Amino acid sequence: MNLIIDIGNSQVKSAIFNNRKILKNIISDEFNPEMLYELKAQYPELTQAILCSVADCDEKLLGILKKEFDLFIELNHLTTIPIENLYESKESLGQEVNPADVDPRRRGPDPQGSPAGHRELA
């Protein structure tokens, strides 16, 4: 079971996935350690987490994510993913773009007008 956290400029989108199915979708103003512990209590099978953030992330939260999950990935411009970033400044590509771009089920234009391959967390 997986926890996905996308910390944006104005809100946090997070979701619990199991076997590619969304079990819970959360949109909030923040994501803090208390929320994490609450989710772990509700979903004890959570073993993997990925976090991407356009803002600086709370070091306490990062420490807890690293400790509480068997696999934790902090997605940023240094994370190895199977696409090539051709931007001159690698940091200028929004970190939230990369996960959607490597999902083969999400190729092509978005009917709501997002760039090809980019979708908001459902």
Image: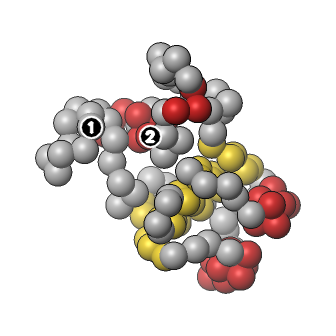
In the visual, does 66 lie left or right of 44? right
Element marked by disc 1: loop
Element marked by disc 2: helix
State whether residue 32 is above or below residue 15: below
In the visual, does 32 lie left or right of 19? right
Label 2 neighbourhood size at 10 Å, few (<14), some (14-19), many (20+)?
A: some
x%, y% of residue 112?
17, 51
Q: Residue at x 61, y 55 (%)?
A: 55
Observer-nearest of 36 and 32: 32
Q: Which residue is mark 1?
A: 115
Quadrant holding the C terminus = bottom left
Quadrant holding the N terminus = bottom right
Residue type highlighted by circle 2: Val
Q: Which residue is mark 2?
A: 97
If you read the primary sequence from the N terminus, does the residue marked by circle 2 or circle 1 appear first?
2
Residue type highlighted by circle 1: Pro
